[in-house]
Image (cartoon, rainbow, N blue to C red):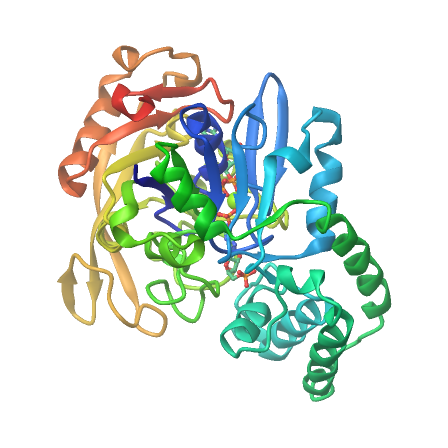
């Protein structure tokens, strides 16, 4: 068997959690492969709503193993909170969650370094979620990091203290308040004790053995392709490879073990935090998208910036990821707009281009739009594609033609049930 990958094609929050939860019955293992608690994946079903940060979105489906892979960075305090928040749902967490020994730990001083760095950047700040993601990946690649497996060893405290001392030296160069450190450390060590009750695994073996035994694996991306450390709008990105290749390094999967790549995008576009966003709207349409789409961050509560769908950016993300099937979410949010726009090209340095250029940060990129008629129908009430308003069909067919990949699912509401499958093979 090959593992399938589901990942975001925009700047995150495309609805990955909802769709992973919807697709989980088909899979034996759901695995996160990068990122950490900067992610906020929202699931809704039976009138309940739940946000996950580190735990994969298969956790509410019986029989699926949820794996936190080696490419993920884990804050034990946040993970403990997530586990406690699952208590009312009767999830036997120690039985269904497994963690790679090679995943790196976010320690309290990583969070302080994140905040100090952002404070020092002032106006040019990234708009980080301040979960310590950047500093933790820096220590990973700098070969100084602490891993989940270290918590099993007798040297753990020594290693922790050595890392903390190194961080305190760096922090002394910033004018930054360290008074929260003691409380953060208390929560960290309590979290480490809880973490140690979850089975640690060598996830590369787990995943490859599962595939060899005919089991099905879905790799769940976090963030989005335009936040990728290599291919996103650098430096306004996160610190991991959010693209499909990240599933190889973040789980120990060889490239020929990747099957379908499900690319998920909103029927419009959002971004939270700083950085370029060519199709961002500052008018009533942007306000309406934000209000109708309840566009507030699932992790930080910050208002998300809203704009129209951006084809050059989507085409780029589809290319980098090798997307085989598209999933379009939040189509219902577009109901009630008289006109809907799609950005087909950019004006860039005096030229019209249809690709995502190198320097999108300092050079102005102006979107060129094609305008479509909107529709009034409330899509949340539809039970099949056959009932789609003609204008939505036109919108979908245009996107498919331009992107050259079929849209297999159209999501029309936050609930698990509000999911219209256009290509039934995605379920088998
Ligand atoms: P993720 O990070 O990609 O998992 O996405 P988030 O959970 O951060 O943000 C997506 C938001 O949109 C959540 O509040 C979801 O409940 C909601 N959502 C997902 N799909 C749909 C949809 O098709 N329609 C509407 N209206 N909301 C959706
Ligand atoms: P999910 O998985 C949206 C953004 C932050 C900031 C930048 C860097 O829910 O889609 P970081 O904390 O990683 O240093 O922040 O990336 N960001 C996200 N935006 N969805 C996310 O995750 C994000 N995770 C990070 O807002 O701009
Ligand atoms: Mg999110």
Going by the image, does 256 lie left or right of 169? left
Quarter the C terminus occupies: top left
Q: Is residue 126 visible?
A: yes
Q: Percent x, y for residue 326?
A: 28, 36
- Quarter of the figure with residue 118: bottom right
- Quarter of the figure with residue 152: bottom right
Q: Nearer the viewer, residue 291 or 186?
A: 186
Q: Is residue 123 positioned above or below 426 on the image?
A: below
Going by the image, does 31 lie left or right of 392? right
Q: Nearer the viewer, residue 308 or 160?
A: 160
Q: Nearer the viewer, residue 161 or 134?
A: 161
Q: Is residue 254 positioned above or below 349 on the image?
A: above
Quarter the N terminus occupies: top left
**Number of dots carrying numbers:** 0
Residue at 42 percent across and 29 percent down: it is 27
Residue at 69 percent across and 89 percent down: it is 173
Q: Percent x, y for residue 168?
A: 74, 82
Q: Is residue 44 positioned above or below 366 on the image?
A: above
Q: Percent x, y for residue 234?
A: 39, 69
Q: Percent x, y for residue 233?
A: 37, 65
Residue at 22 percent across and 38 percent down: it is 371
Going by the image, does 189 lie left or right of 51? right
- Quarter of the figure with residue 45: top right
Q: Is residue 130 visible?
A: no
């Amino acid at each position: 068997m090959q593992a399938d990958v589901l990942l975001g094609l925009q700047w995150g929050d495309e609805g990955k959690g909802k769709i992973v939860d919807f697709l989980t019955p088909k899979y034996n293992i759901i695995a996160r492969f990068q990122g950490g608690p900067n992610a906020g994946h929202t699931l809704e079903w039976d009138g309940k709503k739940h946000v996950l940060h580190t735990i994969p979105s298969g956790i509410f489906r019986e029989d699926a193993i949820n794996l936190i892979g080696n490419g993920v960075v884990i804050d034990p305090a946040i993970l403990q909170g997530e586990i406690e928040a699952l208590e009312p749902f009767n999830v036997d967490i120690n039985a269904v969650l497994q963690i790679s020994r090679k995943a790196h730990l976010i320690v309290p001083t990583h969070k302080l370094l994140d905040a100090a760095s952002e404070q020092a950047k002032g106006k040019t700040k990234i708009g980080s979620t301040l979960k310590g993601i950047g500093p933790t990946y820096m220590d990973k690649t700098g070969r100084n990091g602490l891993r989940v497996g270290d918590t099993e060893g007798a040297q753990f405290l020594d290693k922790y203290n050595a890392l903390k001392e190194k961080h305190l030296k760096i922090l002394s160069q910033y004018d930054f308040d360290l008074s929260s450190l003691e409380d953060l450390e208390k929560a960290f060590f309590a979290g480490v004790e809880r973490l140690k009750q979850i089975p640690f695994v060598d996830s590369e073996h787990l995943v490859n053995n599962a595939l060899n035994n005919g089991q099905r694996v879905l790799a769940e991306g976090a963030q989005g392709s335009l936040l990728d450390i290599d291919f996103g709008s650098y430096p306004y990105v996160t610190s991991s490879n959010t693209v499909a290749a990240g599933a190889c390094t973040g789980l120990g999967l060889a490239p020929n073990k990747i099957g379908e790549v499900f690319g998920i995008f909103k029927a419009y576009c959002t971004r939270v935090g700083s950085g370029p966003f060519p199709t961002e709207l500052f008018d009533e349409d942007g306000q309406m998208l934000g209000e109708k789409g309840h566009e507030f961050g699932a992790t930080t509560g910050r208002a998300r910036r809203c704009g129209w769908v951006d084809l050059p950016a989507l085409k780029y993300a589809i290319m980098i990821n090798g997307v085989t099937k598209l999933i379009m979410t939040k189509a219902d949010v577009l109901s009630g707009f008289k006109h809907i726009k799609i950005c087909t090209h950019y004006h860039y340095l005096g030229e019209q281009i249809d690709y995502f250029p190198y320097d999108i940060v300092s050079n102005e990129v102006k979107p060129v739009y094609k305008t479509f008629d909107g529709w009034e129908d409330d899509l949340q009430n539809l039970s099949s594609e056959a009932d789609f308003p003609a204008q939505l069909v036109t919108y979908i067919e245009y996107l498919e033609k331009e992107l050259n990949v079929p849209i297999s699912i159209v999501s029309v509401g936050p609930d698990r049930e509000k999911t219209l499958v256009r290509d039934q093979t995605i379920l088998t």
